Each structure stands twice: as structure tokens, then as C-alpha cells.
Image (tube, rainbow, N blue to C red):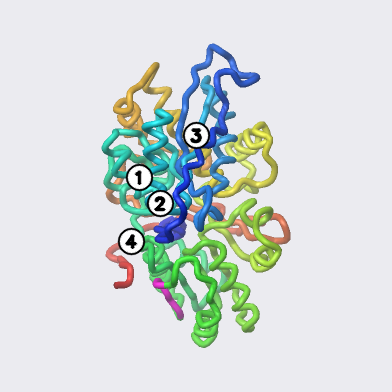
Amino acid sequence: MAHKKGRLLAAATVMATVISGLSLGLSSGTAGASSSEPTITLGLLTDATGLGASGNASSQQGMLAAQQLAKRDGYNLKFVVGDTATSPATALSAGQSLVEQHHVLGVIAVSSLTFSAAPFFKAQGVPVVGVAEDASEWQTDDNMFSVYGTIHTNLVNTDSGLFFKSQGVTNLGSIGYAISPSSAEAAEGAAASAQHAGIKAGYVNAAFPFGSTNVAPIALAMKAAGINGLTMSTDPNTAYALIDQLKLDGVKLKAVLLATGYGSDVTAQASPAEAQAAQGVSFEDPYEVMEVNTPATKQFAADIKAAGLKGLPTESMYNAYVSVGMLMQALKAAGKNPTNTELVSQLTKIHTWDALGLFGSHPIDLANRTDYSGGCFWVGKLEGKSFDLVPGAEPLCGKTIPGATVSPPA
């Protein structure tokens, strides 16, 4: 799973300062809500606009589905969106607004720029639940809890190598963004994992410009290196551009594995050109994909439908939905009118976390922030407008390779 988090982006692009101020939740007066049920207000810190929006904006829809989850637990959930605009300065001001103006009980963070607001959240003692897709604050700040555990991208896991070995890949190409140490480490880690499995890492570029689609030189270099497998710790725009260019250059790929893009990100939101480039591409997900058809995925599907949403969920929808589930678990344990300190304390006590069943039979210990480096992922391969489960990756679980580490390029 260390590779899975390789999408981690620390965007440096400075956008206009925007805080959406958009309230999308149920209030105590919403039709169908019981007046006897307490209303809780959560903040959603997310990249609703800017370069990070392609991966994270749909987290707002995940919160709509999570309202159904909260309702079953006896709460009316209201949420307020803080839009980072994919700008560090805006991320901080959005986080401050959630706490100081909207007085949220806690923050759900599905953003590549959470690190910008993290010192403020820590100083205020605000519980933050979300995805560790940006920086190391999820490891060090005791008020922050990642729904898939602490990821150490400098360690090497066997998962990528196992996947590409199963697909017949003999020479791997791997790409990551220079601006994000986590993305760079994920790209290098995937290559090291492949080498551990006996696969040549013919082309590794962990210093690719953030968001760039100038991929023609990279494609030619990969062709010259003889790669027949590809993985990218990048946003979809970079990934699809490179896949398309490799096809134009006549490179035959046995397997492509992307860290993000499962679900409606590609079946409904991608452009026609991107959707075409994604055909035959495999997408990994740290949660059970909907095609597994388990009780957990059926419940998620029912909550999506009840929220008035259609189609497959995106990964950021999963992330928001599961994050609310974690916070609800702590809230129920904390009792009536909990303080921030009590919520953080209860979150710390969650030692067996299965992401509302979406981790299958592979729960994690949230309190383990030191030696956890990976877990399991499910892989769906896009064929037409649907996904096929990849045999052997339903899920695929890896292990840390002793003594193997990577570091971002200087």
C-alpha cells in the first residue's frame, strides 16, 4: 500500500484565495430528520478547485453518502466545505475558517495540502480524520488519524512487485512528481519492489514536473529502455497523457497500474480521450472495490443511492465516507457533548479498524504509527465502462522488505 499513496501531492501552484463556505449537509430542520437526534457539524477540508480537484473534489459526494451512515448511528450530520483551491495559503485560511467561524466538531481531510493547516489544527486540538496523502503530519501529530493507517513511503513493500510479476511484466517504468517527496518515494519504491521480484526497472523518473503533460521525451526514453509495464504516482492528467503517447510510439504494455482513478473518476468524469487511454488499465484501491460485492460494499452502495447519487464511487468518495465512519466510532464511545480532547482520546483507542468492513479481513491498528508501512489493495481493470477484478489482487497484500529504503531525489 505504500505505492498506493504515491499520488501524494504537495502542490506549489498558487491559486486565488477561496473558501467555499458551502454548507451541503443536513440540519436539524431537514425533512426526514428527527428532532430527537443530535446534529453534528463537521468540516471537510478538500481540493474542491485547482489542480488537486481532479482527484479530491468528489469527496463532497462521499460526505453526502456519509450522512446516511450518521443517520443510522442516530446523528444528523451537517458539513461545511473548506476549499483549499489547491493552494497552501488557502488551505490554511480554509482550515481556520472551519474552526473559528463554523465551530466544527472535527475535520475530515481529503486534500493534498492538509499539511498547510495541520499546525493550526494541532494547536487548537481539533481532531482530524482523513487520508495521509500529503506529508508526515499524519505520523507526528497526535490529533490526526489516517483512515488507512500511517504510511512510510521511504520503506519498500512487496506489493507492486507481486502485481507486475503476476501480469508477466519483465521491465518496469515508474514515474513520480519531484515536488512531492511522497510521490517521488512511491515511484522509487515501486521500482525497488519490482527489482525484488526479479523484474528489471528499466526507467525510473522520480523528478517529473507536477501536473505536466509534456510526456513525449519520457515515452521515447521508456521505449528505448524496453519497458513492458508501467506505474505512475501522479495525477490522472499526467498518467493518461503518457499512456496515450506510449501507444502512439508503439510500446506494448503487459500491465499498467495507477494509484488513483478507480470508479467514476474515469467512467463518468474523464474526458473521452482520457477514458480511451484508460482502457485496459488497472487501478488499485485500498478498499474493497464495488465489484467484490460484499456486505460492506452493498451498504456503501445503498448509502450512495439514498443520497441521490449515481454510478460507481470515486476513491475520494470512499475516503470521505470512511473518515466519517471512523469519527462516528469515536463519537459514540465519547458519549454526550464530547470535548476535542475526548474525541482524540477515543480515536487513539481504535486498535482494530476495518474501514466499515471495506478492508475485508485485513484490519489495521490506528495506534501503530511507527512500523506500519503497507496493507492490502484491490485492483480493478477498466474494460469499457466497467471494471473487472484482477485475479490474485482481490486483494493483494504485501510485506515490508527488510532493510530496503528509498529517498526522494536531491
Left of 369 or right of it: where is 159?
Answer: right
Whole-number angstrom distance, CA of label 3 to CA of label 4: 36 Å
- The percent position of residue 310, horizontal first and vertical second, equals 70, 42
Residue at figure coordinates x 62%, y 79% from the top left: 252
Whole-number angstrom distance, CA of label 2 to CA of label 4: 22 Å
Q: Nearer the viewer, mark 1 or mark 4?
A: 1
Kind of element beneath mark 3: strand
Quadrant location, the N terminus: bottom left
**Which amino acid does the dot numbered 4 rest on?**
Leu
- Which secondary structure type mostly characterizes the magenta part of the structure? strand
Q: Which residue is mark 3?
A: 80
Residue at figure coordinates x 34%, y 40% from the top left: 144
> Is label 2 in contact with label 1 (beta carbons under 8 Å)?
yes
Dot 3 or dot 4, earlier in sequence: 3
Whole-number angstrom distance, CA of label 1 to CA of label 4: 26 Å
**Which amino acid does the dot numbered 2 rest on?**
Leu
Q: Nearer the viewer, residue 308 or 327?
A: 308
Q: Residues within 10 Å of mark 1 (few under 14, many from 20)?
A: many
**Which amino acid does the dot numbered 1 rest on?**
Ala
Q: Quadrant of residue 266?
A: bottom right
**Position above or below: 170 against 49:** below
The tag on residue 113 is 2
Quadrant location, the C terminus: bottom left
Q: Which residue is mark 4?
A: 155
In this picture, which residue range is highlighted in magenta? 203-207
Whole-number angstrom distance, CA of label 3 to CA of label 1: 16 Å
Instruction: Examine the rendering and report whether any part of residue 296 can be seen.
Output: yes
The tag on residue 76 is none
Q: Which residue is mark 1?
A: 117
